[in-house]
Amino acid sequence: MADTNIASVLTQSPVPKSGTTSVPPKACGVISNDSLLGVDDAIPIIDYSMLTSDDPDQRSQAVKNLGKTCVEYGFFAVMNHAIPDSLINGTMGALMRFFDLAEEKKRKYQSNNYTDKIRWGRGDVHHVSREYFKIAAHPQFHCPTDPDGLREILQEYSKRLREVGINLLRGISKSLGVEEYYIQNAMNLQSGYDFFTANDYPPRVSAPNIIGQFPHNDPGLLILLMQNESGGLQLEHKGKWLNANLNPNWIIVNLADHLEVLTNGKYKSTIHRVIVNNEIRRVTFPLFMGPSLEALVSPAPEFVDDDHRPAYRGMSYKDYLEANQHHIIEGKSCLKQIRL
């Protein structure tokens, strides 16, 4: 992506996709006493090129701003991340071709067995039609064989996106006052368990704009999301829901449960939800970037003292993902259950 000479973190008005009109979601009463209308306040933006710059002053300022953003927001968009637009657009096209396959070709991945690393299914919650597939991406990459070219492009996209995530975690480590490989080593990210969930929300013009996913937070360290259309995702900030109406080729990053646990609550897991705009087809492809399944995640000694006692019970990442019979690949949060 083109370089832009701006500060590492800045606020910017929402940027709709060229040639499209951003349509705000309409309240429909699905969530009691809670309007589904988000607000268009600015979302913090990280300039990745500054975080990875050869200029130590730029890197230092980027790390400082990244830490401030993690404390005050817990989410941000990433620009200038160097993943080519052609790879992003090709990935979204490949995902759509998978969802457009005849159902009998996809049904072979339909399963309730949590050991299956490729799973496909449909959901219909409050009249929202959602199709999805879930794949384990690291340390071993798994992918459907159809359509042609899907595996190759998703594997390349996964590699490039994971590299961005690793560099963000190095910056986050430094922002916490520890050395840049601290999180990487403590969470054994060489064997980190990552998975993707692809979601397809088809347009349903006759239906009202309604909730697609209820407010929740997610397991792991970071969630890195890209989407084919601007809008739909809402992020909670100081009692308001902010619309993530951003350039579709920017990466939206949420801090997740295990970064909160590791930092003993200094950095918080982001609560977010999805509002369906039924006038457009929306495809999302979030990467859930997590520790090794064997990693025991608990508040690190660097964030515990007499004034900050351990606030979370330690648990292996695998046990956390399996808690309450949630399947490893499903990505459910049980953060409340381990708070002390």
Image: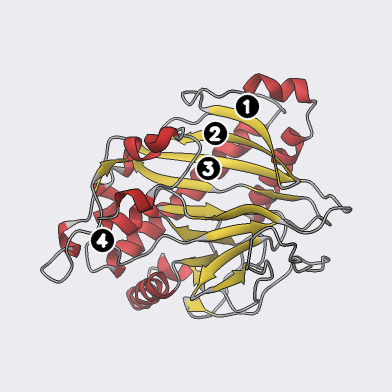
N-terminal label among 1 and 3:
1
Q: Which residue is mark 2?
A: 135
Q: Which circle's residue, 4 or 1, is located before the other in the chain? A: 1
Residue 264 disc label: 4
Q: CA distance from mark 4 to mark 1?
A: 38 Å
- Which residue is farthest right? 206
The numbered dot on residue 187 is none
Q: Residue at x 61, y 33 (%)?
A: 152
Q: From the image, tell me which residue sits under label 1.
A: 144
Q: Quadrant of residue 234?
A: bottom right
Amino acid found under the numbered disc labelled 3: Ser
In the drawing, does residue 316 fall left or right of residue 169? left
- Residue 324 in percent (x, y) is at 41, 36
Q: Amino acid at mark 4?
A: Asn
Instruction: Find out whether the residues at labels 4 and 1 contact each other: C-beta distance under 8 Å.
Output: no
Q: Secondary structure at mark 3?
A: helix
Q: Are marks 2 and 1 in contact (CB under 8 Å)?
A: yes
Nearest to N terminus: mark 4 or mark 3:
3
Q: Say which label, 2 or 1, has the lower sequence index.
A: 2
Q: Earlier in the sequence, mark 2 or mark 3?
A: 2
Q: CA distance from mark 2 to mark 1?
A: 8 Å
